[in-house]
Image: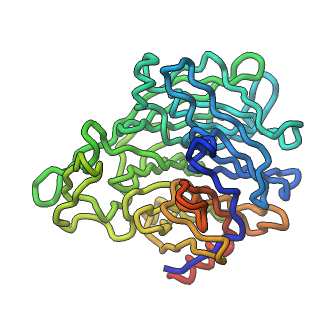
Amino acid sequence: LPAVAPRAETPVLHDDEAGGDADADDPAIWRNAANPDRSLVIATAKQGGLRVYDLDAREVQSVPAPAAPGPDHAPGRFNNVDLLHGLRLSSGRADLAVTSDRGGDRLRFHRIDRDRPGGPLTDVTDPAAPPVFSSSQEQIDEQRTAYGLATWTDKSTGRSYALVSRRERTSVALLEITPGAGGKVDYRKLRTLDLPAKFRLPNGTSWTPCGEPGELPQVEGMVVDPANGTLYAGQEDVGIWRMRADLTGKPELVDKVREFGVPGTYDEETEECVAGADPGYGGSRLSADVEGLTLLTEPDGDGHLLASSQGDDTFAAYDRELSDANEYEGGFRVTAASSELDGSQECDGAAALAAPLGRTYPDGLLVVQDGHDSPGDGERPSTNFKFVDLGDVRDALEEGR
């Protein structure tokens, strides 16, 4: 596959006590319409909260995750982030960063004000916001909680929604975002859809992806195409699903991971799955896990769905148009620009914005998580985000055709 190199990278995060248990995961790109050069990248750092970066990949703000409600409870852990634009609040219209708090099983909302003293993000979450999937703090502490996230505004009604997946389960919930008093933001659950956990193979047998006992094949990466209200959801060990964003109708599997149908046995000692013989029922472009999904849109309505193929450090591109059945159109790698600026390995999250971002990224920007930043810092876990010129990505996809 063709390669693209990043133009910049964010400061490294370390998932250890000295580093504040910060682990880069998922980014979103906010465009400052009044001054595109002052646009921002907002990204999750799991237990380390949120990080905000400028277009030079410099940190602008660090927002801590909520503290644990008690000494024996799970602390906040920000997993995925997405944006809502122009949401009508009691205090006026606002752009919001929406985050799935896996630790508390809730959504968190931060208003974006680029020039606010102290940093652009202000927490406007309604204190009464309920857990997404859990019915008690005991259930929250089991951490089968809010995980993947995508936001969506229905053009026909103007109502805004979040689609939230559940850790270690196949569930996806549809939440309507609602304004509360005093400029706060709340939500209510409308419905839940469960994707399959078991699959019928062409040879007549049934297959379930191997995992730790009790875990089902979860969804994380999700994105909604605003042009037609289509949700794309990455079931990590299975493939990419396409369905209506209102969670009605029947989901369709767009593409499968190479490992689809491969039997596996969980080894308690190594905490890994031992794979059996490959029966050949999987796809050819994605290696588990399927992770960050994002849209590369074009002004004429064309464009691509981009997916992180975490197992082989590549990105796959599919035609955005439903009339072309999301046909595969190539892929690329994000490789090192220099000995100090490496590429992306085991990418968790990705975000693309195909709009001019001032002098720095006039062709738009792709931000991808790097699961193993190098040269790193010895044995410490090191992660960050890479900034890639979207023009380079388009050129790579054209080259690969």
Answer with left or right where residue 89 lies relative to residue 327.
Answer: right
Which residue does the image show at 39% across and 69% down from the upper left?
Answer: 285
- Would you place residue 82 above or below residue 191 in this image? below
Percent from the top left, x then y, of residue 125?
A: 67, 25
Q: Is residue 168 left or right of residue 260?
A: right
Q: Residue at x 81, y 40 (%)?
A: 120
User: Which quadrant of the figure has residue 111?
Assistant: top right
Q: Position of residue 144 (x, y in %)?
A: 40, 32
* Residue pictured at 69% horizontal, 23% vertical: 179
Estimate the x, y position of residue 61 in percent, counting from the top left. Answer: 77, 43
Q: Name the residue at 33% across, 54% down.
A: 238
Q: Quadrant of residue 301?
A: bottom right
Q: Does 132 appear above or below 371? A: above
Residue 4 location (% of width, % of height): 61, 76
Colouring: rainbow
Q: Nearer the viewer, residue 299 or 32?
A: 32
Residue 81 visible in this rendered orientation of the protein: no
User: Left or right: where does residue 342 sit relative to residue 163?
Assistant: right
Q: How many marks?
A: 0
Left or right position of 199 against 18:
left
